[in-house]
């Protein structure tokens, strides 16, 4: 019992001694305080450095763009239609005699004039008939001259004179008929135009009334267009127009409104107008081609013209970017008349302003821009290609 109590006292004394040493250890407490102080000093230093740091604003690089200088010019208001080109006259040339074709002198696409020889047929029989008829006619002519002299001297009666006169007329008609048959062996064009079809073949035998050629007069080309009825009062004869075709790029033909129908179709609400080409000037265009017809109803002079390449579409609105100094200014486009390449700017632009026509797809209002020329733009792909090759 005494031994157990003694052991317990020793253990209690040891525990008390260990706890006092932990609480009163000055070295441990001092170490913790030093670490805390170091961390606080580091934070204070970082804060001071942050205050001393001057933030430099970020400068965005200039976007390379290509510009076009706004100019003044004439622009028109027009109505545009799709149509098919037609011709006032297209004729077929038929054979007027039977026989073998000896020679064909034209091909499809050749331009011919009225009376030009297109082909020749064998004519030996017709030539002999014509010579025989001419000889008989000359004989009857001489006979009539003698009879006339005798009749003037009352040596022949009136009946003999009339018989000689009738014989002369009959001989003349037979000669004329033979001459026409001989002439019919030569195939001639009845109109001026272009050969659009050639059926005649050298060496082939044809009969009369067989089609040999087809000729189209291209000097009288026109297009019929159906115009909405609300324009009936503004469309009149003589209005200028322009006709072009997607098949022949860059070629335009001056035209005019030749006829205007005064009747509006109740089903479609349109009226018909005929637009004729003024002058071909030797340029290529043919009947049957699909064409674009632009009827000019009004003209604006000294209009501010903006290239259509400068327009940026955002929904139903149209914008342009004007270069001011070294920045791009976004502007709402208030447009007037337009044509194939330009649109009229009603306000916001004047002659001499620079508008961006290339590089504006990703621009923002106020962005820094750098104007480049065509020569620089052409050199940039070469430089990029050389860098890629070296890498």
Image: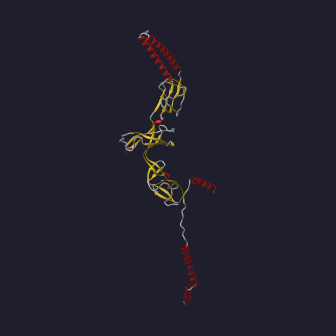
Which quarter shows the N terminus? bottom right
Instruction: Out of 301 and 246, give the one closest to the viewer.
Output: 301
Outermost residue to the right? 390
Instruction: Out of 212 and 193, give the one closest to the viewer.
Output: 193
Q: Quadrant of residue 17?
A: bottom right
| Colouring rule applied to residues | secondary structure
Q: Is residue 224 above or below residue 329?
A: above
User: Is residue 357 toward the left or the right of residue 267 in the image?
Assistant: right
Outermost residue to the left? 266
> Does residue 103 appear anywhere in the picture?
yes
The total of numbered circles placed on residues is 0
Q: Quadrant of residue 162?
A: top left
Q: Position of residue 123 (x, y in %)?
A: 53, 22
Q: Position of residue 352 (x, y in %)?
A: 50, 55
Q: Position of residue 245 (x, y in %)?
A: 48, 42
Instruction: Out of 309 and 157, give the one closest to the viewer.
Output: 157
User: Is residue 105 toward the left or the right of residue 229 in the image?
Assistant: right
Which quarter shows the C terminus? bottom right
Q: Quadrant of residue 377?
A: bottom right
Outermost residue to the front? 153
């Amino acid at each position: 019992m005494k031994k157990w109590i003694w052991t317990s006292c020793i253990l209690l004394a040891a525990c008390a001694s260990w706890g006092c040493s932990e609480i009163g250890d000055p070295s441990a407490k001092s170490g913790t305080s030093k670490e805390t102080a170091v961390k606080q000093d580091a934070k204070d230093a970082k804060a001071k450095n942050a205050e001393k740091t001057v933030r430099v604003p970020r400068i965005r690089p200039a976007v390379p763009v290509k510009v076009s200088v706004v100019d003044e010019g004439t622009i028109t208001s027009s109505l545009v239609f799709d149509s098919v080109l037609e011709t006032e006259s297209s004729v077929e040339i038929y054979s007027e005699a039977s026989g073998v074709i000896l020679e064909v002198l034209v091909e499809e696409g050749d331009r011919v004039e009225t009376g030009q020889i297109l082909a020749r047929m064998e004519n030996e029989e017709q030539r002999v008939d014509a010579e025989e008829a001419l000889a008989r006619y000359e004989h009857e002519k001489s006979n009539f001259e003698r009879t006339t002299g005798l009749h003037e001297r009352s040596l022949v009666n009136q009946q003999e004179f009339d018989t000689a006169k009738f014989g002369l007329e009959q001989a003349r008609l037979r000669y004329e008929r033979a001459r026409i048959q001989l002439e019919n062996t030569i195939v001639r064009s009845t109109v001026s135009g272009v050969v659009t079809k050639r059926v005649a073949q050298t060496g082939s035998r044809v009969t009369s009334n067989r089609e040999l050629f087809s000729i189209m007069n291209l000097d009288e080309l026109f297009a019929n267009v159906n115009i909405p009825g609300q324009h009936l009062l503004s469309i009149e004869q003589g209005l200028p127009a322009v006709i072009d075709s997607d098949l022949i790029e860059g070629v335009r033909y001056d035209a005019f409104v030749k006829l205007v129908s005064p009747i509006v179709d109740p089903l479609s609400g349109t009226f018909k107008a005929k637009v004729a080409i003024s002058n071909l000037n030797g340029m290529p265009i043919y009947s049957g081609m699909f064409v674009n017809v632009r009827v000019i109803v009004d003209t604006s002079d000294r209009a501010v013209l903006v290239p259509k390449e400068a327009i940026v579409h955002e929904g139903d609105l149209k914008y342009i970017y004007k270069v001011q100094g070294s920045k791009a200014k976004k502007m709402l486009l208030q447009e007037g008349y337009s044509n194939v390449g330009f649109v009229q700017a009603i306000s916001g632009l004047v002659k001499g302003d620079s508008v961006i026509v290339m590089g504006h797809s990703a621009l923002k209002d106020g962005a820094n821009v750098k104007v480049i020329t065509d020569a620089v733009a052409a050199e940039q792909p070469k430089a990029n290609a050389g860098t890629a090759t070296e890498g």
